[in-house]
Image (tube, grey):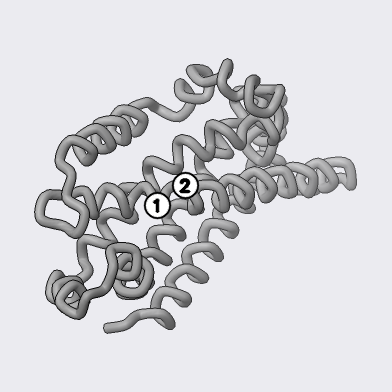
Amino acid sequence: MTLDPLKLSMLGTAAAQSFYMVSVSALLTAILGIPLGVLLVIFRPGHILANRPAQTVLGLAVNALRSIPFPIFIVFIIPLTRFLVGTSLGPKGVIVPLTLAATVFMARLTETSLLEVPKGVIEAALSCGASRWRIIWRVMLPEAKSGLILAITIMVITLISYSAMAGAVGGGGLGDLAIRYGYQRYQTDVMFLTVFALLIIVQLTQNLGDYLAKRCSRR
């Protein structure tokens, strides 16, 4: 199997586009998804800011968005994507659906991590007169740091997978390269290298996440 310089150049360009899509979407997802996950936890009955109606509404909204397959979700929110960024094509146009789809996923992962924080730690902070905000910022999040790092790792890997699927609808990146050249033009060398590149990226991401989570573990 040989690759000419043009194919190598296309592979590099596609990898850069994927990195751009995933990195920007991951940052936005963390900014939106982690606070949403915190709300899902603290609004639970018996928690520090119990509010069953709010928790129910948020839970239903998160579940509704999670139930839509990503390729359908991209098409479904095209009007919103065009309104926000002016286009629904290319790496720029994919960031909106990537972020929204991953945010609800990250929210549930955050919720799971925070629910593992021992209730006794939270009750002790309450008995010491700590405010709700201080409990969230100084108790819950630090105690769940290791789990949150693993949650972010899973989220980034999910975004890599989503960004590859976005290539089917003109999203650019490695998925677009694999479809247009590897599948439609039967260039198996391009397909093989694209898949290999995705495997390496995912493995490196997982290894880094596992390492950081182990370093930050409080148990």
Looking at this rendering, what residue extends furthest in the front direction?
129
Looking at this rendering, what residue extends furthest in the right direction?
5
Q: Residues within 10 Å of mark 1 (few under 14, many from 20)?
A: some
Residue depicted at 21% across the width and 53% down the height: 49
- 96, above or below 29, in the image: above
Residue 3 is labelled as none
Q: Where is residue 57 in the image (x, y as percent from the top left)?
A: 24, 32
Q: Position of residue 178 (x, y in %)?
A: 65, 35
C-alpha span from label 1 to label 2? 6 Å
Q: How crowded is mark 2: few (under 14 residues within 10 Å), some or many (20 or more)?
A: some
| Image quadrant occupied by the C terminus | bottom left
Residue 32 is labelled as 2
Asked whether the beta carbons under mark 1 and mark 2 sit within 8 Å of each other, the answer is yes
Looking at this rendering, what residue extends furthest in the left direction?
46
- 138, above or below 111, in the image: below
Q: Can residue 147 be seen in this view?
A: no
Residue depicted at 27% across the width and 62% down the height: 114
- 196, above or below 68, in the image: below
Quarter of the view holding residue 112: bottom left
Label 1 element class: helix
Residue depicted at 16% across the width and 57% down the height: 47
Residue 35 is labelled as 1
> What kind of residue is marked 2?
Leu
In front: 157, or 152?
152
Q: Is residue 180 left or right of residue 146?
A: right
Q: Is residue 140 left or right of residue 76?
A: left
> What kind of residue is marked 1?
Pro
Residue depicted at 59% across the width and 50% down the height: 198
Q: Where is residue 7 in the image (x, y as percent from the top left)?
A: 82, 42
Q: Can residue 200 be seen in this view?
A: yes
Label 2 element class: helix
